[in-house]
């Protein structure tokens, strides 16, 4: 790793004990920093992390934030889920303590070439495919960030000449200072996280930070067909390249090909990676077919645009399960794609009344108290040949720790239902 002496003997407070906070705390503790962790949540997950996964001699407070944890720090590391107006961030500003993100820490230490991917939809797929293309071409690659392990959980394994393909969110980009990818990709911008940002301009401004430290020796890859990204090339110091869907390739694949060109990867090998790619867990994942009703896990769809993509990808009539924590988006945008295809909508979570207000009059809408009730209800509503699509359009944090836990819960419920309805069940 690079810059390892920078953190030795520094007093570092990590705000947020989820996966990235945990990984960053253990990394910096191993480098000789005096680390403390604070998390406003005190639940089974945070207690488990604190007791079994966090190094024993790292002080941790749960269920509160203490001013001293921030005031006595040389550096504050903010986890992605921590709001910018939270008390620790406010204290850090008041005490002039630098507050940075976990990807900033990992970027400082990273000896590998960094390829960073952001966007509203599809960034996990693009990140995964770039990683697989590098691997297929014989390169040592680490795929991390919002996908798989946190960046700071992998950086100690990296060496010069390796590649780090990192999925980064707008939340993580808010608090970078010097994070500088060799190749940055912004694959699209659609309305998202408007519960955190006042408008689309603020959201786009957060995304644009991915290239703010790049120079003429770096590369920025943009979607030529995305109107929100039009003109960004004038703001970038890096060399700017554009991609668009070509021939039989979708925009995600075209983005990967463009990155592959910059990395000198063999095009036929990349195309073979595409043909072998079976998709991601929790993204249009077939779970089971029960009495000719297909159940699809699309828990990763946390935006309306993701749900539209899923709806357009299904040819059969659809019974849709949606809902979760509201992110400030307008759910009416799905109506055109869903009309004549979605026959019923079953809603769950904190946002169910808000979604119902947007969709009632267009589709039959029903409410459910939880996911299990929703699955049973959709099965009763569906006819042979229909598809039950779980595409929430919302974040998972009202009921689950992340979209992965939510997707696993959906699959478990569906498989239990399949067992009860099998000929031998």
Image (spheres, rainbow, N blue to C red):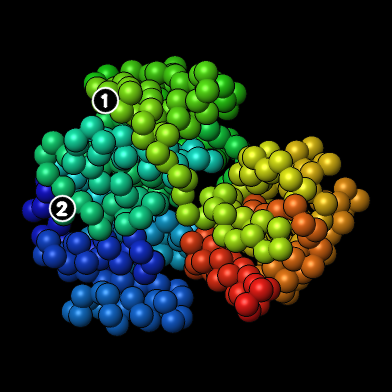
**Residue 128 higher or lower than 42, as above or below:** above
> Residue 246 location, x and y as percent?
51, 19
Residue drawn at point x = 42 percent, y = 77 percent: 45
Identity of the residue drawn at 31% across and 40% down: 131
What x and y, as percent, mark residue 393? 65, 52
The residue carrying mark 1 is: 265
Which mark is first along the chain, 1 or 2? 2
Mark 2, residue position: 157
Q: CA distance from mark 2 to mark 1?
A: 23 Å
Q: Secondary structure at mark 2?
A: helix
Q: Secondary structure at mark 1?
A: loop
Of all residues shown, which one is farthest toward the right? 361
Q: Nearer the viewer, residue 37 or 294?
A: 294
Q: Is residue 10 visible?
A: yes
Characterize the local packing of mark 1: few (<14), some (14-19) or many (20 or more) Cα atoms within 10 angstroms: some
Residue at x 20%, y 51% (from the top left corner) = 155
| The C terminus - image quarter | bottom right
In the drawing, does residue 281 fall left or right of residue 307?
A: left
The crowding category of the residue bearing disc 2, from other C-alpha atoms within 10 Å (few below 14, some 14 to 19, many at least 20), is few
Q: In terms of image quadrants, where is residue 380?
A: bottom right
- Residue 20 percent location from the top left of the image: 34, 60
Left or right of 76? Residue 419 is right
Toward the left, the furthest residue is 5
């Amino acid at each position: 790793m690079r810059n390892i002496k920078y953190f030795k003997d520094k007093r570092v407070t990590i705000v947020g004990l989820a996966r990235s906070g945990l990984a960053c705390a253990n990394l910096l503790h191993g480098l000789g920093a005096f680390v403390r962790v604070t998390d406003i949540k005190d639940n089974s997950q945070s207690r488990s992390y604190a007791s079994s996964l966090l190094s024993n001699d790292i002080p941790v407070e749960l269920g509160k934030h203490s001013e001293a944890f921030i005031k006595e720090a040389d550096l504050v590391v903010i986890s992605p889920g921590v709001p910018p107006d939270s008390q620790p961030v406010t204290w850090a500003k008041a005490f002039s303590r630098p507050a940075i993100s976990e990807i900033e820490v990992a970027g400082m230490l990273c000896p590998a070439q960094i390829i960073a991917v952001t966007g509203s939809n599809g960034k996990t797929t693009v990140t995964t495919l770039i990683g697989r293309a590098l691997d297929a071409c014989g390169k040592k690659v680490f795929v991390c960030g919002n996908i798989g392990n946190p960046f700071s959980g992998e950086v100690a394994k990296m060496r010069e000449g390796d590649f780090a393909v990192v999925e980064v969110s707008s939340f993580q980009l808010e608090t970078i200072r010097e994070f500088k990818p060799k190749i940055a990709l912004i694959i699209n911008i659609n309305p998202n996280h408007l519960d955190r940002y006042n408008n689309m301009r603020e959201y786009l401004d957060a995304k644009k930070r991915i290239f703010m430290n790049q120079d003429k020796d770096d590369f920025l890859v943009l979607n030529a067909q995305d109107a929100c990204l039009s003109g960004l090339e004038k703001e970038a110091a890096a060399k700017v390249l554009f991609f668009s869907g070509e021939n039989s390739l979708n925009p995600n694949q075209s983005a990967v090909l463009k990155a592959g060109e910059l990395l000198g990867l063999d095009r036929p090998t990349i195309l073979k990676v595409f043909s072998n790619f079976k998709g991601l867990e929790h993204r249009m994942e077939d779970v089971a077919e029960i009495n000719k009703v297909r159940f699809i896990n699309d828990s990763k769809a946390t935006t309306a645009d993701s749900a539209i993509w899923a709806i357009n990808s299904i040819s059969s009539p659809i019974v849709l399960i949606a809902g979760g924590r509201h992110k400030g988006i307008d759910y009416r945008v799905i109506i055109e794609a869903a009309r004549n295809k979605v026959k019923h909508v079953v809603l769950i979570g904190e946002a169910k009344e808000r979604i119902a207000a947007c969709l009632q009059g267009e589709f039959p809408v029903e409410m459910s108290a939880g996911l299990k009730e929703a699955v049973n209800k959709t099965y009763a509503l569906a006819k042979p040949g229909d598809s039950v699509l779980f595409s929430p359009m919302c974040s998972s944090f009202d009921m689950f720790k992340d979209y992965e836990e939510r997707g696993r819960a959906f699959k478990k419920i569906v498989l239990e239902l399949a067992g009860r309805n099998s000929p031998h069940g």
